[in-house]
Amino acid sequence: MGKKINIVDVIVIIMLIVIAFGLFIKFKPSGTNEMAANHKTIDYTVKIDGVRNYTINALEQTTAVYRAKTNDYMGEIVNISYEPYRAVKVIEETAEQQLVPVQDKYTVYITIQTEGREADMMYLDSSGTEIYIGGNVDWFTKWVNIYSSQIVGYEIIS
Amino acid sequence: MKNLKFSIIDIAVILAFAVIVAVGIILLGQGSVAIAAKTVQIEVIAEIASVDKPLIESIGLDQIYLTVDNVDTATITNVELETYQETIYNKYSNSYELVDNVNNKYNGIITFVTEVTESDMDFMRGSTKIKVGLPVYIKGKGYSARAYIIEMRVIGGGEI
């Protein structure tokens, strides 16, 4: 054949190997087959404190929820409930703490249904966000942006 | 041209570039830029909270920018002035109540219309996301203030 491989060819081959490796890392399935087999429908409820009725009205406009920063789809809102927001008041004379209602402010509970996964040590929603009580989640819908909400409960549906 | 020959390395390089281009297209397509986004008009109500009266009074029914870099525009259709209310504890009712402040602070309730691209995830005015809870700038000739969107609705198709 008489063909010779020069240094440029070697560099190109190394570059191709690096690119192929990078693509593999980028697009490899996240998790093992075991995780893929553990798909779960999960309802989890997040709480937002101290918002006005504008937020509630905007939440009722649509159901699809996306994760802030990554724009990944998280699931669908299946329930919204709210109650008057209560803030702590310290009674100065007795140093007693009370929760008292705040005018025109609400605590909102939003239940999101997600096609998530169950791993050995955690639950994940469809965007890869870990679901655990006490966790903080930033998300948005087409109509409203939620800077911070706290997970207060979850239920494995199937 | 008659001496044009392709080695296995050349073919590999061409294939690699093809893959890179394909991957680039896929990655770019994952963003919030929706190819099939349509254009609609929206009416937005935004609140400038707790500022001095002259600032609100200087806002007219003007063309404004929604960002500090003077890019995304809108048109103000209404301006309302209301007294800023503070949340104060009332020991007689044992609750926090909204009370007019005595420090001469006011809210500006600004209504503006603008044309946005609508996708499944967002309403976008250029690079500015329009959603309840997000800030925009009300920046006109001689005034600028940060406002938070409190209401919005679609009022029609494109072309204001």
Image: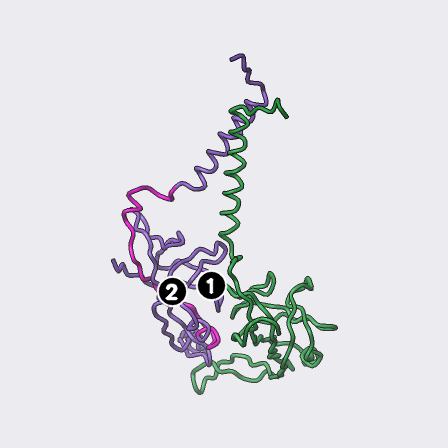
Chain colours: A purple, B green
Instruction: Chain letter for mark 2, please.
Output: A
Q: Amino acid at mark 2?
A: Val
Left or right? Give the position of A64 relative to A154: right
Q: Which residue position holds label 1?
A: B120
Q: Amino acid at mark 1?
A: Asp
- The picture places residue A90, in percent across and down from the top left corner, at 44, 75
Real-space Cα distance between discs 1 and 2?
A: 22 Å
Query: Judging from the image, what secondary structure is the residue with disc 2 in?
Result: strand
Left or right? Give the position of B19 relative to A42: right
The quarter holding residue A151 reads bottom left
Taking the spot 49% from the left edge, 52% from the top edge, the residue there is B30
Q: Is residue A38 magenta-colored?
A: yes
Mark seen at residue B17? none
Look at the numbered discs 1 and 2 and tell me whether their residues touch, using CB distance below 8 Å.
no
Mark seen at residue A46? 2
Give the farthest residue toward the front.
B2
Give the farthest residue toward the top.
A2
Give the farthest residue toward the left.
A158
Residue range of the region highlighted in magenta in the rendering:
A29-56
- The picture places residue B44, in percent across and down from the top left corner, at 56, 75
Q: Nearer the viewer, residue A41 or B27?
A: B27
